[in-house]
Image: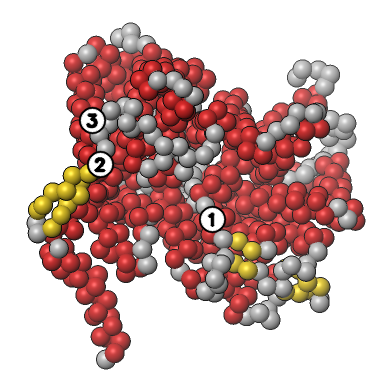
């Protein structure tokens, strides 16, 4: 009887209690949702960089998360050496272009026609190289992002709603707006410009694109540069929320479940997936986390991805690759 | 080479298929083994403790990962966590049954790692490539979380770490603070030799061929009557077994105590790089990769000061990262089969020297 009671109790705690809590304190729920969404935007931005590169070159770029940190670190490091904020921003953009060019020349071109998995592992090498290089040049200690110098808003707004206060950081709103502008800009770039159309052609078929005279090398540089710019924006946003250091690397890995969820080839998928993962892990940690001792956000995203992989191996919006295993 | 196979005729299928068909190779292996076993006579604690034991431990882990990634073609980023499973299982076993010999528990803990590995290998039937890598990342983060959040695993120690007790073999302490480097080295070496021999037999036999055919083309393998799920799960289990034993050895015979951070994602990458650099699908490569990746920081730390260039410890770490990263890209471009393949090419060149072919 006692055992039955405790089992029922556990079931109640898992299935009912969190929802009762949600209904009882809608302001807390809204706060958690908002924080999840903001975290999700950042995951989505990293995933966006992945998708750009994967679509155009078929490379699963493991180094995207590190490129985020590297871009932010370059920006902060330059500023710390006395370069004015916006000049530092411009130099960082140049650095990301040089990086894209170097990656195309030194990594992608010699590895053309190799199996995907070899390219995947080559990006591990790139990851470690960038970590070592970034720390060697700018030092490994955590740094503070230059938010004021870049005229990013600070402080918080308290909204009275749902019978309580919801705290919203101004920076998060700015991040959401900038992210939306960037995604809109990218989609216009993809659909309206000559280079964008060439990019989509390459994504559809390398060989067909080559045969109509599109230069693959050029496209790869452009696409890695675009991913580098996305990384820079992500790095600024992320760095403003916490310190800039390579400790972010582990968090950047969470973009992988986002990709799985959204599908590897879909930009809307990356965004929706990012938001789902962000909200899911915040809700899971806040309402169900205490049942198992907390700290679940380190693996919750991966668990969602794993379940998704089992039932929808191509993700929500991914292209179906027909291959019977 | 200083020797050629001329004059050594094979008169049976057995000798034709031998792993070391040439007499000189067999003598060479015997000499290497003899030297390895005589190394403790040098009484050089630094050599044994800081170089040889870690090298052997990482070789074992690299062999484990090589079985999965190199032979069965399943990319795994969860090696660190599987090593952790072995270490924690060994710790719990020796806590509950302190009278049973620790070596038995070190080997037995591999079975726990194998079980956990097989469970996390289940998705491998439906997914592969980098999708599977993400699935193994899930294992890595979930298990790491378990190591931190379940106090039962580390016996509710205040330090939240494994504290290795003293255990003996024939009244000689082999684990714990009183064990000498020589005894620990000899035990690690023996376990490694036995397990390498087993791995060699596995990959050269029917099971190894099944793994390799799945790696090369899973559809063709299935058409030839190889059942994919058991084959892949077996690869996961055997690989995790090796990693688990490596983890248990690492904590019990090298560190003497460990927190969960030892089994982090970085450890997984560390071992993966050994496998990539050493050579995918080669046991020799596991050793070469472990030696290179492990020795690189030591060399970087010790050589420049002797040349009169002062180097900061942080700088060494950063440069190591850069070199390892660049080396991986370089090797993937120049020789995707790693150091083991370079070794083969070198051997062949010497064999036909002074002629080019």
* Precedes in sequence: disc 3 or disc 2: 2
Between label 3 and label 2, give the one nearer the viewer. 2
Residues under numbered marks 3 and 2 in contact, where contact means CB atoms less than 8 Å apart? no
**Do the residues marked 3 and 1 share a common chain?**
no
**The numbered mark 1 sits on a residue in which chain?**
B
Near mark 3 (Cα within 10 A), the count class, few <14, some 14-19 or many ≥20, is: some
- Side (left or right) of B133 relative to B321: left
Between label 3 and label 1, give the one nearer the viewer. 3
Name the residue: 69% across, 30% down: B342
Near mark 2 (Cα within 10 A), the count class, few <14, some 14-19 or many ≥20, is: few
Quadrant into which the N terminus of chain B falls = top right
- The residue under label 2 is A155
Name the residue: 27% across, 91% down: A1
- Residue A93, how many percent across, how many down? 38, 20
**The numbered mark 2 sits on a residue in which chain?**
A
Residues A166 and A183: in front is: A166
- Side (left or right) of A324 relative to A173: right
Which SS class for mark 1?
A: helix
- The residue under label 3 is A178
Establish if B6 lies above or below B89. above
Image-quadrant location for residue B312:
top right
- The residue under label 1 is B261
- Side (left or right) of A294 relative to B306: left
- Residue A290, how many percent across, how many down? 32, 67
Q: CA distance from mark 3 to mark 2?
A: 17 Å
């Amino acid at each position: 009887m006692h055992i039955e009671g405790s089992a029922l109790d556990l079931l109640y705690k898992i299935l009912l209690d969190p929802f009762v809590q949600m209904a009882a304190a809608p302001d807390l729920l809204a706060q958690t949702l908002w924080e999840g969404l903001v975290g999700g935007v950042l995951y989505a931005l990293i995933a966006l960089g992945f998708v750009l590169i994967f679509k155009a070159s078929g490379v699963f770029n493991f180094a995207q998360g590190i490129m985020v940190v590297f871009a932010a670190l370059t920006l902060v490091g330059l500023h710390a050496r006395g370069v004015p904020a916006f000049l530092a921003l411009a130099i960082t953009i140049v650095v990301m272009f040089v990086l894209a060019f170097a990656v195309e020349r030194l990594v992608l071109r010699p590895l053309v026609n190799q199996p995907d998995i070899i390219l995947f592992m080559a990006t591990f090498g790139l990851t470690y190289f960038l970590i070592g290089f970034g720390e060697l040049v700018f030092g490994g200690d955590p740094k503070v992002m230059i938010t004021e110098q870049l005229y990013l808003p600070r402080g918080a707004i308290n909204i009275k709603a749902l019978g309580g206060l919801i705290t919203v950081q101004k920076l998060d709103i700015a991040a959401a707006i900038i992210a939306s502008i960037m995604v809109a800009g990218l989609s216009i770039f993809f659909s309206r410009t000559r280079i964008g159309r060439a990019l989509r052609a390459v994504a559809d078929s390398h060989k067909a694109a080559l045969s109509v005279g599109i230069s693959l090398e050029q496209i790869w540089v452009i696409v890695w540069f675009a991913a580098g710019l996305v990384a820079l924006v992500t790095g600024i946003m992320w760095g403003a929320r916490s310190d800039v250091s390579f400790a972010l690397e582990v968090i950047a890995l969470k973009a992988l479940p986002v990709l799985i969820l959204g599908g590897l080839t879909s930009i809307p998928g990356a965004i929706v997936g990012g938001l789902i993962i962000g909200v899911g892990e915040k809700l899971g940690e806040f309402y169900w986390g205490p049942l198992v001792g907390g700290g679940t956000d380190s693996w919750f995203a991966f668990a969602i991805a794993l379940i998704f992989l089992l039932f929808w191996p191509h993700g929500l919006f991914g292209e179906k690759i027909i291959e019977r295993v | 080479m200083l020797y050629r196979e001329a004059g050594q005729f094979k008169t049976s299928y057995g000798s034709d298929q031998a792993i070391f068909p040439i007499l000189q190779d067999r003598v060479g292996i015997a000499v290497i083994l003899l030297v390895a076993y005589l190394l403790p006579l040098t009484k050089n604690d630094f050599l044994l403790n800081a170089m040889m034991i870690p090298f052997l431990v990482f070789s074992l882990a690299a062999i484990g990962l090589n079985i999965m990634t190199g032979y069965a073609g399943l990319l795994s980023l969860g090696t660190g966590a599987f090593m952790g499973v072995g270490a924690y299982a060994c710790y719990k076993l020796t806590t509950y049954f302190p009278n049973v010999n620790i070596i038995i528990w070190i080997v037995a803990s591999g079975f726990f790692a194998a079980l956990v590995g097989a469970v996390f290998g289940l998705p491998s039937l439906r997914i592969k490539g980098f999708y599977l890598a993400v699935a193994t990342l899930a294992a890595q983060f979930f298990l790491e979380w378990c190591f931190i959040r379940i106090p039962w695993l580390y016996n509710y120690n205040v330090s939240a770490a494994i504290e290795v007790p003293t255990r003996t073999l024939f009244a000689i302490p082999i684990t714990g603070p009183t064990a000498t480097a020589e005894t620990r080295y000899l035990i690690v070496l023996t376990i490694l030799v036995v397990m390498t021999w087993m791995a060699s037999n596995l990959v050269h036999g029917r099971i190894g061929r099944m793994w390799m055919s799945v790696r090369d083309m899973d559809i063709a393998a299935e058409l030839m009557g190889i059942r994919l799920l058991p084959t892949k799960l077996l690869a996961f289990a055997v690989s995790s077994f090796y990693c688990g034993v490596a983890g248990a050895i690492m904590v019990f015979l090298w560190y003497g105590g460990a927190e969960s951070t030892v089994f982090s994602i970085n450890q997984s990458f560390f071992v993966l790089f050994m496998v990539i650099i050493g050579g995918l699908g080669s046991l020799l490569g596991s050793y070469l990769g472990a030696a290179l990746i492990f020795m690189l920081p030591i060399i970087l730390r010790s050589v420049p000061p002797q040349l009169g260039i002062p180097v900061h410890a942080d700088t060494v770490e950063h440069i190591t990262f850069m070199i390892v990263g660049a080396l991986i890209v370089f090797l993937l471009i120049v020789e995707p089969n790693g150091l083991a393949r370079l070794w083969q090419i070198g051997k062949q060149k010497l064999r036909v020297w002074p002629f080019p072919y």
